[in-house]
Image (cartoon, rainbow, N blue to C red):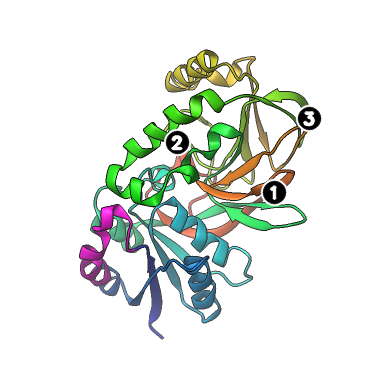
Amino acid sequence: MQKRARIIYNPTSGRETLKTKLVDILDVLEQGGYETSTFATTAKPNSAQDEAARVAKDGFDLVVAAGGDGTINEVINGIAPLENRPKLGIIPAGTTNDFARALGIPRDDFVEAAKVITNGKLTSMDVGKAYNDKTTKYFINIAAGGRFTELTYDVPSDLKTILGYMAYLLKAVELIPQAKPMNIKATYDDGEYEGMASMFFLAMTNSVGGLEQAVPNAALNDGNFTMIIVKTGNMVEILQLITKALNVGRHVNDSRIIYKKTRNFSVVPKDGRMPINLDGEFGGNAPMKFVNLKERISIFANLKKDKVAKIDD
């Protein structure tokens, strides 16, 4: 039986240039042995998520998420809860494409990204699960909390289409005065922290907001998050930490942060509201618990062996 693939694409991604390359992408996948069809996401909530779940239950062999990090996150939420999950391919067409950067997938050529699916190695990939008594969601790149981490989902989609990465920089300038620390209780595998923090990150790859040295020892399938809690709320000190992160990851031993590996994590705000950011999308409000689901999906990537615990044959 011929293998079946479904491309789930966001027609507004990549400044709407993705649509012009769909025929070429389809040809690459067809030449790779996949009977391929497409689905354009709509304004309906969870459009990509629902379609990914539907085709997975229908027995498709491959789902290709074509769009930005938000589209990829929706597809993950469609397939991660299922017992039988199709393989995943990525064609990055968003503004930052953090996840594609971490996987070594070309971010400036849709057709070359499609070739990674047919030529690249299949890698087992961890998936994060975030849940509380109101919601359960999944993520594949990063979970974060704190006012400054609202940056990605506070930027209107039409502004991202027009301005690209500049839209995030403009929003960052707006949010800097509001990036104040809050009192939290965070619990992780070998300890807990109670006190003030401006933000936290649970990273599953080495790319956080384009900073590839932010989590230098991240592995895609070791079953652990790389946890960073930023205790300071002083913007000068935060900029100092970013500078250290750019300098071969020197921030990891700084006393102003907590840097740990952990499979489990929970956060409870002691005062105020703490929205949770999952792969750049709003994921609900804390309190929230997180668990790493080791090797939950199989994904096509272009990785060096030092980036993963295991590359499948």
Residue 81, image x, y percentages? 63, 65
Name the one closer to the observer, 274 or 113.
274
Q: Residue at x 32, y 63 (%)?
A: 11
Q: Pointer 1: residues within 10 angstroms few (<14), some, or many (20+)?
A: some
In the image, is residue 245 above or below residue 133?
A: above
Q: Secondary structure at mark 3?
A: strand
* Circles 2 and 3 in contact, beta carbons < 8 Å: no
Percent coordinates x, y for residue 247 in the rendering: 43, 18
Q: Amino acid at mark 2?
A: Gly
- Magenta region, main secondary structure: helix
Precedes in sequence: disc 2 or disc 1: 2
- For marks 2 and 3, the one nearer the N-term is 3
Q: Residue at x 36, y 45 (%)?
A: 104
Picture disc at residue 291: 1
Question: CA–CA distance between discs 2 and 3?
Answer: 26 Å
Q: Which residue is mark 2?
A: 209
Asked if the residue under mark 1 is in contact with the one under mark 3, i.e. CB atoms within 8 Å, the reply is: no
Q: Earlier in the sequence, mark 3 or mark 1?
A: 3
Q: Amino acid at mark 1?
A: Val
| Label 3 sits on residue | 192
Question: Over which residues does the magenta segment extend?
Answer: 11-27
Say which quadrant the N terminus sits in: bottom left
